[in-house]
């Protein structure tokens, strides 16, 4: 029996945001698959799914929706290969935000199941976690190439967590931890709770206004993280 499932966002939550190797791999993969330069300039990135970002960038360049859908899986695969070829195990350990690991460990010790929920395509996300030394701490997740919206990813993460941990997690036993209003919308769409942290591009006030159930400046104090997550799920039924 676990106390619930906690799903961490990656960029801006576990790791510092702004990984240029990710953007570089993204552009190179689109170039390779479409045979021409496709820019990401001006496309919103924070809190977006990699698949959404690719759709926006490609349709802006006049690529037909049909061709986008046909080639999107290949773009995601090539992006992952390029990222993993450059960002090796250990290369992102210096990017881990203060207290992120300690907070996850405290939650794990207290009986919560852990996973990631990220806009990163799966191959990039797993390479990033490995580069940061976090892959074993977050054995499961849902990723930005697996659905059209972040809200849908919550359901996929719950299903994946059930397969891995052997426990059913209804949405009201799930807490997302993320750094953008898009994490907040996703959690609420799915019926989950959300703890927002101001370690990405949004300030505490922005996250409060966006309707987060709880907001912290950061995850630096694992006791505060654990207390906050526990409080979010208190009063929710166990099944
Ligand atoms: Mg983020």
Image: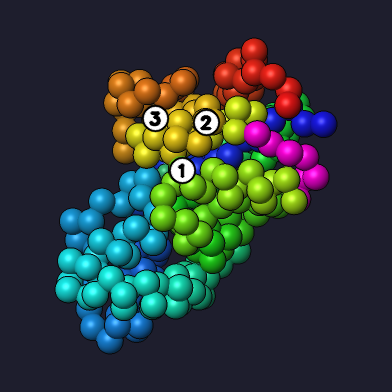
Inspect the magenta stretch and tell me whether residue 190 lies in it. no
Residue at 58% in and 50% down: 156
One can see residue 99 in this view: no
Tell me which image quadrant ligand 1 sits in.
top left
4 relative to 182, above or below: above
68 relative to 177, above or below: below
Residue at 37% in and 45% down: 47
Please say if the residues under marks 2 and 1 sit with CB atoms less than 8 Å apart.
no
Q: Residue furthest bottom?
A: 35
Q: Is residue 195 left or right of residue 60?
A: right
Residue 11 image position (x, y, % from top left): 44, 47
Q: Residue furthest top?
A: 235
| Mark 3 or 2, closer to the camera | 2
Residue at the disc numbered 3: 198
Q: Nearer the viewer, residue 25 or 184?
A: 184
Q: Nearer the viewer, residue 52 or 65?
A: 65
Residue at the disc numbered 2: 191
| Mark 1 or 3, closer to the camera | 1
Residue at 29% in and 26% down: 206
Magenta stretch, main secondary structure class: loop
State which region is magenta.
164-170
Mark 2 vs mark 1: which is more N-terminal? Answer: 1
The quadrant in which residue 100 appears is: top right
Q: Quadrant of the N terminus?
A: top right
Q: Is mark 1 within 8 Å of ligand 1?
A: no
Mark 1 vs mark 3: which is more N-terminal? Answer: 1
Residue at 32% in and 33% down: 202
Label 1 to label 3: alpha-carbon separation: 21 Å
Residue 164 image position (x, y, % from top left): 75, 50
Local packing at callout 3 (Cα closer than 10 Å; few below 14, some 14-19, many 20+) is: many
Mark 3 vs mark 2: which is more N-terminal? Answer: 2
Q: Secondary structure at mark 2?
A: loop
């Amino acid at each position: 029996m676990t106390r619930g499932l906690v799903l961490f966002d990656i960029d801006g939550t576990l790791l510092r945001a702004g990984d240029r190797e990710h953007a570089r791999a993204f552009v190179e993969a689109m170039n390779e698959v479409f045979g021409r330069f496709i820019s990401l300039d001006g496309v919103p990135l924070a809190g977006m799914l990699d698949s959404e970002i690719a759709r926006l960038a490609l349709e802006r360049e006049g690529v037909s929706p049909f061709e986008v859908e046909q080639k999107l899986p290949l773009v995601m695969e090539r992006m992952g290969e390029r990222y993993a070829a450059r960002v090796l195990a250990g290369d992102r350990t210096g990017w881990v935000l203060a207290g992120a690991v300690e907070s996850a460990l405290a939650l794990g010790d207290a009986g919560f199941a852990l996973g990631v929920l990220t806009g990163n395509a799966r191959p990039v996300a797993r390479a990033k976690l490995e580069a940061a030394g976090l892959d074993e701490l977050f054995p499961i997740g849902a990723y930005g190439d697996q659905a059209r919206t972040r809200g849908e990813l919550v359901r996929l993460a719950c299903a994946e967590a059930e397969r891995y941990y052997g426990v059913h997690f209804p949405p009201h036993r799930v807490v997302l931890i993320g750094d953008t209003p898009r994490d907040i919308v996703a959690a609420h769409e799915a019926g989950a709770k959300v703890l927002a942290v101001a370690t990405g591009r949004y300030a505490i006030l922005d996250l409060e206004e966006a309707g987060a159930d709880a907001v912290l400046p950061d995850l630096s104090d694992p006791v505060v993280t654990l207390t906050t997550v526990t409080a979010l799920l208190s009063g929710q039924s166990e099944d």
